[in-house]
Image (tube, rainbow, N blue to C red):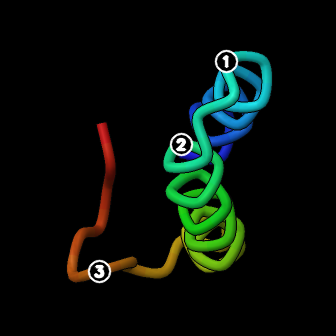
Amino acid sequence: MVVLGIFLLVVGCVAGLSILWTIDIVRVAIGAMLWPPGAMGHAVAGREHHW
Protein backbone atom coordinates (compact mmCIF):
# COMPACT_ATOMS: atom_id res chain seq x y z
CA MET A 1 0.00 0.00 0.00
CA VAL A 2 2.81 2.38 0.86
CA VAL A 3 4.82 1.55 -2.28
CA LEU A 4 1.76 1.94 -4.52
CA GLY A 5 0.93 5.24 -2.83
CA ILE A 6 4.43 6.61 -3.37
CA PHE A 7 4.42 5.47 -7.01
CA LEU A 8 1.08 7.14 -7.66
CA LEU A 9 2.26 10.29 -5.87
CA VAL A 10 5.08 10.56 -8.40
CA VAL A 11 2.71 9.89 -11.30
CA GLY A 12 0.27 12.50 -9.99
CA CYS A 13 3.03 15.05 -9.58
CA VAL A 14 4.43 14.48 -13.07
CA ALA A 15 1.00 14.43 -14.72
CA GLY A 16 -0.27 17.40 -12.70
CA LEU A 17 -3.32 15.54 -11.36
CA SER A 18 -4.13 16.97 -7.94
CA ILE A 19 -6.76 14.32 -7.17
CA LEU A 20 -4.08 11.60 -7.35
CA TRP A 21 -1.88 13.66 -5.05
CA THR A 22 -4.64 13.96 -2.43
CA ILE A 23 -5.74 10.33 -2.58
CA ASP A 24 -2.19 9.04 -2.38
CA ILE A 25 -1.22 11.16 0.60
CA VAL A 26 -4.11 9.50 2.44
CA ARG A 27 -3.07 6.05 1.11
CA VAL A 28 0.53 6.47 2.26
CA ALA A 29 -0.57 7.72 5.70
CA ILE A 30 -2.95 4.79 6.25
CA GLY A 31 -0.36 2.30 5.02
CA ALA A 32 2.28 3.78 7.33
CA MET A 33 -0.08 3.50 10.32
CA LEU A 34 -1.05 -0.13 9.58
CA TRP A 35 2.45 -1.36 8.73
CA PRO A 36 3.95 -1.61 12.27
CA PRO A 37 1.12 -3.64 13.84
CA GLY A 38 1.02 -5.93 10.81
CA ALA A 39 4.78 -6.43 10.95
CA MET A 40 4.54 -7.34 14.65
CA GLY A 41 2.05 -10.10 13.85
CA HIS A 42 -1.13 -8.42 15.10
CA ALA A 43 -4.35 -8.74 13.15
CA VAL A 44 -4.97 -5.58 11.14
CA ALA A 45 -8.53 -4.71 10.09
CA GLY A 46 -9.75 -8.10 11.28
CA ARG A 47 -7.37 -10.03 9.04
CA GLU A 48 -4.55 -12.18 10.33
CA HIS A 49 -2.71 -12.44 6.99
CA HIS A 50 -2.70 -10.35 3.82
CA TRP A 51 -1.77 -12.29 0.71
Q: Nearer the viewer, residue 33 or 25?
A: 25
User: Up-down: is 23 above or below 32?
Assistant: above
Q: Which residue is mark 3?
A: 45
Side of 46 relative to 35 (left or right): left
SS at mark 1 in the image:
helix
Looking at the rendered image, the quarter that the C terminus falls into is top left
Q: First in sequence: mark 1 or mark 2?
A: 1
Q: Mark 1 to mark 2: distance in Å?
A: 9 Å
Is label 1 or label 2 in front?
Answer: 1
The image shows residue 50 at horizontal and vertical percentages of 32, 48
* Mark 1–mark 2 CB contact (< 8 Å): yes
Look at the picture and state if 16 lies above or below 50.
above
Distance between the Cα atoms at labels 3 and 1?
33 Å
Residue neighbourhood size for the residue with mark 2, other residues' Cα within 10 Å, grouped as few (<14), some (14–19), many (≥20): some
- At x 59%, y 62%, the residue is 31
Mark 2: amino acid:
Leu
The amino acid marked with disc number 3 is Ala
Pointer 2 residue: 20
